Amino acid sequence: DRIRKIDEEIYPYQVRDYIKQSYFVVSARMHPIISSIECNVPSISISYSRKYWGILGDGYNLKDYIIDMRHYENYNQIFEEFEKKVSYLQQNREKFIKNIRLKNKKDQEVILLKIKDILQRKGEKRWSLVP
């Protein structure tokens, strides 16, 4: 009763609302994982390519929350790994949230600085950014 599987088509804002209400998210798609990180909601990624390792593993230091399907021979191995990841996430949930909040805050500051720099280079004096 605590797991929600969504089979019908829904709008992105509806997905985001589900993510915000979640204890954690499990997805094999990159965008829901990125959205969960933006919402400060822990996630477990079911990876099928190396792209997950760049942004999640290196960028957010979330290697411990990636299940790389390319490294398992059968369903039982995958399921065992999934159980380990869920247990690890439950034990480290608050640390996970603290770390992604901090990373998100730093990233936002960098983005604002980059935007200000671009505007200054363009000579735009009429724009101002309010954090």
Image: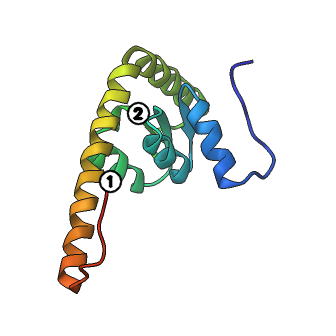
Q: Amino acid at mark 2?
A: Tyr
Looking at the picture, how far across and down is residue 27, in whole percent? 57, 41
Circle on res. 44: none
Front-lying residue, 97 or 27: 97
For label 2, the residue is 65
- Counting every numbered tag in the picture gives 2
Front-lying residue, 84 or 26: 26
Front-lying residue, 33 or 40: 40
Q: Amino acid at mark 1?
A: Gly
Task: Name the residue: 46% across, 48% down.
Answer: 34
Q: Residues within 10 Å of mark 2 (few under 14, many from 20)?
A: many
Q: Residues within 10 Å of mark 1 (few under 14, many from 20)?
A: few
Is 129 on the left or on the right of 13, as rendered? left
Classify mark 1: helix, strand or loop. helix
Is 59 on the left or on the right of 18, as rendered? left
Circle on res. 54: 1
Check the picture and name the quadrant holding the N terminus: top right
Q: Residue furthest bottom?
A: 122
* Up-down relation of residue 3 to residue 33 (above or below): above
